[in-house]
Image (cartoon, coloured by chain):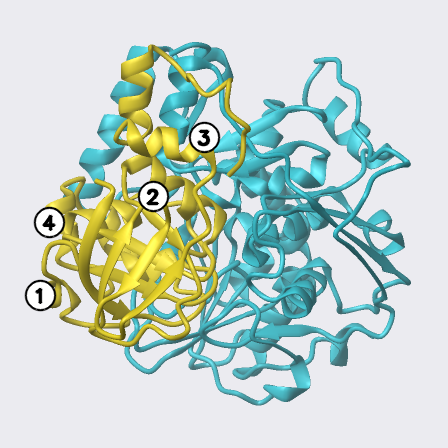
Amino acid sequence: MSELKGRAFLFGDNLNTDYVISGKYKFKTLDMNELAKHVMEDIRPGFYNEIEAGDFVVAGENLGAGSSREQAPLVLKAAGIGAVVAKSFARIFYRNCINVGLPVVEVDTSDIAEGDVLEIDIESGVVKNVTKGVTLQAQPLPPVMMKILADGGLAEHIKKNGGFALEDEEPSD
Amino acid sequence: MAHPDKYAIVIDHNSPSPMESVSNIHKEMRTFAAEQGAKLYDVGEGVCHQLVPESGNIVPGNIVIGGDSHTCTYGALNVFSTGVGSTDLAAALVTGKMWFRCPSTIKIVYDGALQPGVYSKDVVLHMAKTLTSRGATYKALEIYGSVIDDMSIDARMTISNMAVEVGAKVGLMACDRKTVDFIKSRTNRPFKGVEASLSAVYDKVIREDLSDLPPQIAKPHEVDNVVDVDKVAGLEIDQVYIGTCTNGRLEDLREAARVLAGNHVAPDVRLIVAPASKEILLDAMREGYIDTLVKAGATLIAPSCGPCVGTCNGVPSDGEVVLSTANRNFKGRMGNTKADIYLSSPATAAYSAMKGYIADVREVLQ
């Protein structure tokens, strides 16, 4: 999980979860592979077909604003997105990504261009822009979140440990 | 489930179901509630953010999570409440626990007194403009001041409801006499309000006098894209929606009815009204508000989220302009990306429906 490589798809600030997956679809099915075909449809029609497994969604500030719908990280994952990369994240979306095992990378994305190839090491937070030949350092994930992510998401964490096993960590979300 | 008695399931989105797939999801919810012994509020009961407090399920000092981002609504009742995703919710159901980061806090004090025709919705739209949609990400808000003191519980809930629209985890208000009276009218459970310690440290303190605040409108497609009503007055509208967890309460219907009494909506405007709960519907019927609204041309729909989530009961057509009392105006929010959504108070919405264009309700409420 920790070494990821893919192309950057660029989005702006305040990309909300309604745009990731529209409310009009999220009630139609619980099948995320089916829902994934509509990912970002309202703002970037055809996005699903552009994605190759491992590619990244790269955004500005406040990625994942709005609705608590967990379908947002789930469809990104089902569509093949390897990680979401942004300057900052909305709180619920940030938690949801970790909970479903979609890595979040908080880093200054100002100089990343559409199509740039990135190599990301989740544990160290090192983001290599292979296209531009520059290396960025992401905010490290809080230990609690790293632990949940390393277990493969919150459901797996709970199953594995028979409950929350985060007490020895400094809580942070 | 660790504590089924502490859990409620509410079928409020797409309710009653507009299609087979939704019906099947609703059925799963009913089956799950029955299997687990959890409380179920089925079709027609109302929106969760009204039902949870109205039914006496929560008291000041509680910690509440909900699988909906507007769970922060109960901050108005001195309850720490916040939205989570479904896996967080499931983990809490199984373990009875949840982990949180203790957020830093922004303190907001709104002094002065609102003009007639200006409401809590105008205050919170102004707050969204001031803070921006990410101005309080990960943070808690504490909201005080004479403007809040003067408000009803209904009105306060409108403000806390939209705390998430500035990224906040919760929008807390003090536990005052009105809070105590409301809670005591709903439950016999003992409780004790919580208050900030005198040594509390804030990220920042915003203090503002709102005595001159005019009615506010959020323009497409962001909630913080807010202007004074005169900047968009005259803009023709096709549909008006009064309802939702933000503004479907009794006071909201009262103010809309007050504006529309003896009047009629403009010929080309559709007005849709959804009370936030069955109790509100019954109260509004008894008070005559429903009679007034329907005679004025409103279409009454079931207590539910209604068209706010874009799947039923009023999806706009291409190129239409909607004025809504909801909390979000994102592109496609109401089910059509080719429609524009503006947000306002119920009184502004009602008056604009009557005029056929966005208008300043102070013209009739001075």
Q: Are marks 4 and 3 on the same chain?
A: yes
Q: Choose mark 4 or mark 2, whichever is in front.
A: 2
Crowd class of label 1 (few under 14; some 14 to 19; many from 20; radius 10 Å) = few
Task: Name the residue beneath numbered marker 1.
Answer: A49
C-alpha gap between disc 1 and disc 4: 13 Å
**Between discs 1 and 2, the one toward the N terminus:** 1
Q: Chain of mark 1?
A: A
Can residue B39 be seen here?
no
C-alpha gap between disc 4 and disc 3: 32 Å
Crowd class of label 3 (few under 14; some 14 to 19; many from 20; radius 10 Å) = some
Task: Name the residue beneath numbered marker 3.
Answer: A144
> Depth check: A145 or B206 in front?
A145
Task: Name the residue beneath numbered marker 4.
Answer: A34
C-alpha gap between disc 3 and disc 2: 14 Å
**Which amino acid, mark 4?**
Glu
Q: Secondary structure at mark 1?
A: helix
**Which amino acid, mark 1?**
Asn
The colour with which the image depicts chain B is cyan
**Between discs 3 and 2, the one toward the N terminus:** 2
Q: Secondary structure at mark 2?
A: helix
